[in-house]
Amino acid sequence: MPTREQRTVLIDEASAGERVDVALAKLLGLSRSVIADLLNAGEVKQGKKPLVKSDRLRLGDRLQVLMPAPYDPLDLTDVPIADLEIIYDDADVVVINKPVGVAAHPSPGCSGPTVLGGLLAKGLRISTSGAEERKGIVQRLDVGTTGLMLVAKNEDAYLALKDQFRN
């Protein structure tokens, strides 16, 4: 596991008075949800005091932030998922019943199993179209949602499904 960087952030006039989650998102170039995860985990402190997202910052505040682990969207690990049920499978698409707790694709802050990793573990070929970290994924379900998902297995299927969902 990569080493996480510890950063010190000095609050200037532009950030004074802002909520800590808003200010840090701007200053560190991270999403507010990633900052919220860091705050909830106690990884943003002023001195020894962990901050919460609604805390207001003052000029001169010095914050210590344990940055999230570096994220490599190309690192797609094949992880078997016992309850990843294949409903339909042909040369073009695979339809799966995505279980709760499984993300559709890798993303920052997500370290659990993914649909793509589960399909790779089952030996299925998936499309290489789309953003590199979500190859073949045309539509997705949240990690906390179960339901049917379509995954394209080739470029033609990916483009056809994208058009159908768009229309």
Image (tube, grey):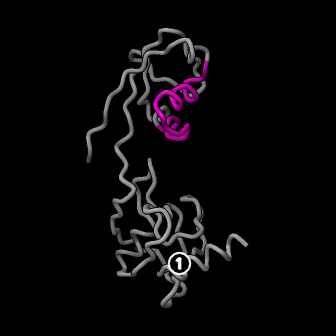
Say if 120 sits above or below 131 in the image.
below
User: Is residue 102 at all visible to an observer of this figure?
Assistant: no
Q: Quadrant of residue 9?
A: top left
**Mark 1 belongs to which amino acid?**
Ile
The picture quadrant where one finds residue 161 is bottom right
Which residue is at the front of the view, 150 or 160? Answer: 160
Assess disc 1: are there few (<14), some (14-19) or many (≥20) residues with their C-alpha within 10 Å of its C-alpha: some
Left/right placement of residue 163 relative to residue 132 reads: right
Rendered view: 148 above or below 73: below
Q: Quadrant of the C terminus?
A: bottom right
- The answer to if 139 sits in the magenta stretch is no
Residue lying at 32% horizontally and 28% vertically, measured from the top left: 6
Residue 135, x across and y down, in percent: 46, 68
113 or 106, nearer to the observer:
106
Q: Is residue 29 magenta?
A: yes
Element class at badge 1? strand
